[in-house]
Amino acid sequence: MRNTQRIHLLAIDPQNDFCDIPEAELPVDPQSASQANTRPLVRPALPVASADADMKRLAAFIDRVGRKLYDIHVTLDSHNPVDIAHPTWWSDEQGNAPAPFTVISASDVRGGVWRARNPLAQAHSLRYVEALEDSGRYLLVVWPEHCLIGSWGHNVHAAVKAALDRWARARLDLVDFVTKGSNPMTEHYSAVQAEVPDASDPSTMLNGRLIETLREADLIVIAGEALSHCVANTVRDIADNFGEDNVRKLLLLTDCSSPVPGFETLGSDFVADMRARGMQTATSLDFLA
């Protein structure tokens, strides 16, 4: 039997590659992010957060409040090696790939500083970085290859996966897994829509099914990685499609989400902005204590 109050958990990209554990591709050493062959968006200002600890707290939270969770949604960043935000896509005049965390602007592409390694993708690549700049959200950041489909890094963190399985067996219910990011022509930070939607690919367009499912919730508890990017964009897109009166239904677990090292300000700005719009915050221990 389901609870009368519809509390949904939205766990955003709780995957191995985002955790500070051996063999993970992201996060990375923040010093390397600030000293890369690039113009970093934000230099490190805070101690390195621990996504592994975030995920262990999230697993404990699911076990503690699982009987009160009406539904659980888990988004999965899902990439191919060849991706517009991976080093393989780009090269300089000498044929060298950009270092991880390189920022590529539209002027870089127009000036030939960086070009698509595949000449057939050059025109799209320029249009893409121009569209990113026009949106005002981000410039293109070249990330290490991460969350490759079928890899260990794509898997859900072991503690979270075990907690999800316990919840599903106890409830005789299914976790709602939502994949994103498999279109190599666009970035997909948000679980709701790609940064630059591709009209020919419905998976990059607004995920109306997820929005409408969440709209029915009384409260949406949010956790996951990374606070500065996928969490921030997902929550903002949900809020923009909910309407301001419903933003109060969003609650961020502040101890179950961390920014990518080097992008801490993006995370803190997101939390401040969304609190001003009505989003609630709590720790995993305080919520329903």
Image (cartoon, grey):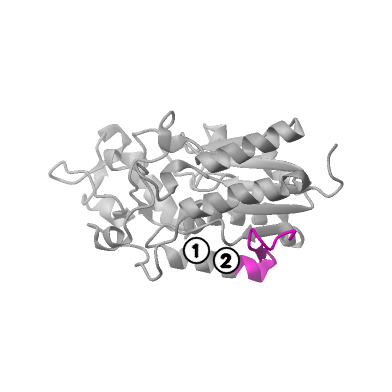
Residue contact between numbered discs 2 and 1, judged by CB atoms under 8 Å: yes
Three-letter amino acid code at the position of disc 1? Gly
The label number, if any, that marks residue 284 in the structure image: none
Q: Amino acid at mark 2?
A: Val
Residue 246 covered by magenta stretch: no
Task: Tell me the element at label 2.
Answer: helix
**Magenta segment boundaries in residue numbering:** 273-289
What label sits on residue 271 in the rendered view? 2
Q: Which residue is mark 1?
A: 267
Q: Position of residue 205 (x, y in %)?
A: 57, 39
Inspect this view and state whether residue 79 appears: no
| Numbered-mark total | 2
Residue 264 position within the rendered picture, expressed as x and y whole percent measured from the top left: 44, 65
Residue 274 among magenta residues: yes
Q: Residue furthest top?
A: 150
At 51% from the left and 68% from the top, the residue drawn is 268
* Residue at horizontal 24 percent and vertical 37 percent from the top: 117
Lateral position of residue 223 relative to residue 2, left or right = left
**Callout 2 crowding tier (Cα within 10 Å): few <14, some 14–19, many ≥20:** many
Q: Is residue 16 visible?
A: yes
